[in-house]
Image (cartoon, helix red, strand yellow):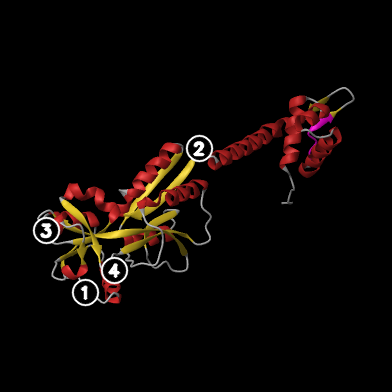
Amino acid sequence: MNRMNISLRQMRAFAAVTQSGSFTGAARQLNLTQSAVSMLVQQLEQELHLQLFDRSRTAITLTEAGKNLLPLAQRILEDLRQVVEGASEIRALRRGFLRVAASQMMACTWVASVLTEFGQQHPGINLRLVDAVADDVVDTVRHGAVELGIGPERVTGDDVTRSFLMNVPIHLVCAQSHPAHGRASMAWKDLSDERWIVYSKEFSRHVERVLHTHGHDFSLNTASDVGYLTTAMALAGHGMGVLLAPEYARGFADNFGVRFVPLRAPAIQREYFVYQRKGQSLSPAAATFLAMLRARGGGATPRRRSSKAAA
């Protein structure tokens, strides 16, 4: 089969001549010269090896072949119009998809609030939020299930990139009956005998390493090992031990009967990042949402030299 070089300009000229009934009318419609329209139609006829119009001094009419091909040409042009219209709607955020992954507690607190604001501003965008344990956020991005991942520092590999989003303070979480409940803050040296509820072993090890760099020979004596921060907070509320949690989870303190107590000597923060697949351009929806995330900042602190932990 011979390769054809048919252009959309030729198709538009064919349809315009048919609609207007003359090359002159088509030229006005397309903002071209009459000779340019005539040439485009001739080129199309040559490529198709068919005569599309019968030409005379007084009239121009479709041939039988032209009548058969006209609906196909009109369908192509209509499809193109819809593509252009759809692209415009995507750019204007009137349609499209936003797919985001976040660590579970962050997903149901800060990210949920920003997503709600985004949805109110752009109701035509379909939203999908994947809430996962922190260790799974990078893999969710890697496998293409989402465009953006939001979570604490994790190893990315060569196929996922990350950019800093914010620092979040880490607090001690304890039951109402715990001695720390009424304190304005707690020093690490006063926590050596505590029974700790662990929901991320990687986070616990990182906290211990940070404390060691500040001269504390400190180990988290694990009393309970769970998978989710919400479960850890529930156990803490029942007096099963204490835990470390990011400040944004404070909104659930009353639900679980716990209090968030700031830590000192040293104070610890954890860095949160935005993850995306390497080399993949963000959709307009994802790019706009990312800008909104950075503008809101989650009430977090700017990046600076300080004690940090990742959970």
Total labels drawn: 4
Say whether residue 104 is left or right of residue 66: left
**Residue 63 position (above or below residue 181):** above
Closest to the camera, between mark 2 and mark 3, is 3
- Residue at the spot of label 4: 202
Closest to the camera, between mark 4 and mark 1, is 1
* Amino acid type, callout 4: Glu
Mark 4 vs 1, N-terminal side: 4
* Amino acid type, callout 2: Arg
Say whether residue 9 is left or right of residue 93: right
Mark-to-mark CA distance, 2 and 4: 41 Å
Element at badge 2? loop
* Residue 98, position as x, y percentages in the image: 44, 46
Closest to the camera, between mark 1 and mark 2, is 1
- Residue at the spot of label 2: 94
- Residue at the spot of label 3: 178
Report the magenta residues as a range: 50-54
Query: Most prominent secondary structure in the magenta stretch?
Result: loop
Mark 1 vs 3, N-terminal side: 3
Question: What label does residue 218 carry, if any?
Answer: 1
Closest to the camera, between mark 2 and mark 4, is 4
* Amino acid type, callout 1: Phe
**Residue 105 position (above or below residue 78):** below
Element at badge 1? loop
Mark 2 vs 4, N-terminal side: 2
Are the residues tagged 2 and 4 within 8 Å (C-beta)? Answer: no
Disc 2 crowd rating (10 Å Cα; few below 14, some 14-19, many 20+) is some
Disc 4 crowd rating (10 Å Cα; few below 14, some 14-19, many 20+) is some
Viewer-proximal residue, 150 or 279?
150
* Amino acid type, callout 3: His
Q: Could you tell me which residue is drawn at 16 percent across and 68 percent down?
A: 190
